[in-house]
Amino acid sequence: MFKNDLIGMLVVCTMPSPIADLGPVSEARTRDLQVEVIAKYSSEHSRPQQGLWVFEYTIRISNRGPKPMQLVSRHWIITDAADAVKVVQGSGVVGKQPLIESGEAFQYSSWCRLETPTGWMKGTYLMRGPDGEEFEIEIAPFALKAPYTIH
């Protein structure tokens, strides 16, 4: 809690998740599904002297629609500052194919490695509705940037 001296009110701040703590650096909405991403540099896992920069990211997928949706697979495009592109595809995320009920969200954290101190990621998730329809939802591009870099 802190006191706001300008208007003399007591303000209580709650921070329920990492996304709420930092705010999304990327946000996209496809149909009734919202994808928010935060990313940060992981100094403890990086080895810049050896050309290795590691970034952690947390993603929250919120179902704002009336029907449950299942995340089936992921497709990532990861680009570093030298324009080297890696494509990562696979079933689910972090070993799961979560069913996201109406009004609920699924949140997970993962990481990626780059050979440069900056880059970016973007991608899609393949989702499945209760009627078996499959469709892609966007993961908007987000920057990966180690501290003290200019890009």
Image (spheres, rainbow, N blue to C red):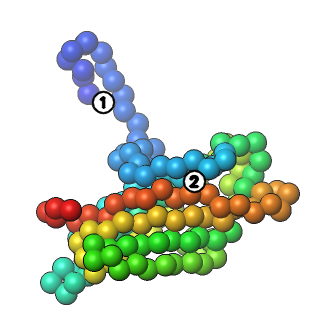
Quadrant of res 70: bottom right
* Distance from Cα at disc 2 to Cα at disc 1: 29 Å
Q: Residue at x 56, y 72 (%)?
A: 75
Name the amino acid type tagged 1: Met
Question: Label for residue 61?
Answer: 2
Farthest bottom residue in view: 50
| 37 or 96, nearer to the observer | 37
Name the amino acid type tagged 2: Ile
Is disc 1 surrounded by few (<14), some (14 to 19) or many (20+) residues within 10 Å?
A: few
Question: Label for residue 1?
Answer: 1
Left or right: where does residue 49 sit relative to residue 16?
left
Quadrant of res 112: bottom left
Work out whether mark 2 precedes mark 1 in sequence or the reverse, and give the earlier one. Answer: 1
Quadrant of res 56: bottom left
Query: Where does residue 139 sit, x and y in percent of width and height?
Result: 52, 58
Residue 17 at least partly seen: yes
- Front of the two marks 2 and 1: 2
| 51 or 97, nearer to the observer | 51
User: Badges 2 and 1: C-beta atoms under 8 Å apart?
Assistant: no
Q: Residue at x 59, y 70 (%)?
A: 74
Name above or below for residue 103 compared with residue 117.
above
| 14 or 135, nearer to the observer | 135
Quadrant of image for the C terminus: bottom left
Element class at badge 1: loop
Name above or below for residue 83 compared with residue 22.
below
Query: Where does residue 59 sit, x and y in percent of width and height?
Result: 49, 58
